[in-house]
Image (cartoon, rainbow, N blue to C red):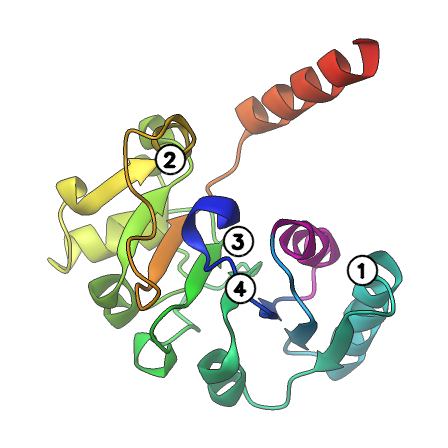
Amino acid sequence: ASSYLSRPDSAHLLIIGTGALAQYMAWAHCTARPIRRVSVLGRNELRARATAEEIRSLVGAEVQVVQAKSLEEAVAEADVISCETSSAVPILRGAWIRPGTFIDLVGSFSPTKREADDEAVRRARVFVDRRETAFHGVGDILQPIASGVMAEADVLGDLYDLAGGTVAGRRAASDITYFKNAGGGHLDLMTAEVIYRLATA
């Protein structure tokens, strides 16, 4: 999704969350874009420090990895924001996000959980990983629909549309793009299929 929705010159990644997925999301984003700085933010300082070390070992010495001290300041400086939390209330405020930012929401996976607030949705071009699952149990999509901030039609496309070129992702450098990845076994299966095909070619 980042290859379609983040700016090609994105250099500063913010990772919000310190769970097992955080280091791999950082690694993936550093592979997709010329990331030169990764900021890590979590509720527990010791865990954030450990996560920063894990990321550093994956991305290499050419990428600076630091612990963020202020969520608001880190959000305002980032080109790409990747959230891997199980938050029940929005922690990412749309008012803090600067134009041109790509928001990657990977955590909160139920109707009662949510990582980004209504203002983030209001300001962004919204995409999902898969339409068939996005409207069934994903709080970052269902809650803004319920509050009237967006309608189902305001989800502009999914990863299939983006990859197939049937929907334009980022149209301008100033666009804020919002991607909700609900995840699922179908993604694991597709990834395994690609790896297998490449390995046996």
Q: Position of residue 92 (x, y in %)?
A: 42, 72
Residue at image point 33% right, 64% down: 176
Using the image, tell me which numbered label, if any, was put on residue 59.
1
Q: Position of residue 68 (x, y in %)?
A: 65, 84
- Which residue was labeled with disc 4? 9
Q: Tell whether 199 sits left or right of 194.
A: right
Using the image, tell me which numbered label, if any, was put on residue 162.
2
Task: Please report the bounds of the magenta region as a residue range.
Answer: 18-32
Up-down relation of residue 37 to residue 148 (above or below): below
Q: CA distance from mark 4 to mark 2?
A: 19 Å
Helix, strand or loop: magenta stretch: helix
* Crowd around label 3: few <14 · some 14–19 · many ≥20 (10 Å): many
The tag earlier along the polypeptide, 4 or 2, is: 4
Q: CA distance from mark 2 to mark 3?
A: 21 Å
Q: Position of residue 5 (x, y in %)?
A: 42, 51
The tag earlier along the polypeptide, 2 or 3, is: 3
* 4 or 2: mark nearer the eye: 4
Q: CA distance from mark 3 to mark 4?
A: 25 Å
Residue at image point 68% right, 72% down: 38
The amino acid marked with disc number 2 is Leu
Q: Tell whether 101 sits left or right of 73.
A: left
Up-down relation of residue 60 to residue 112 (above or below): below
For numbered disc 4, what is the local secondary structure?
Answer: loop
- Please tell me in which quadrant of the rendered image residue 33 appears: bottom right
- Please tell me in which quadrant of the rendered image residue 185 appears: top right
Q: CA distance from mark 1 to mark 3?
A: 22 Å
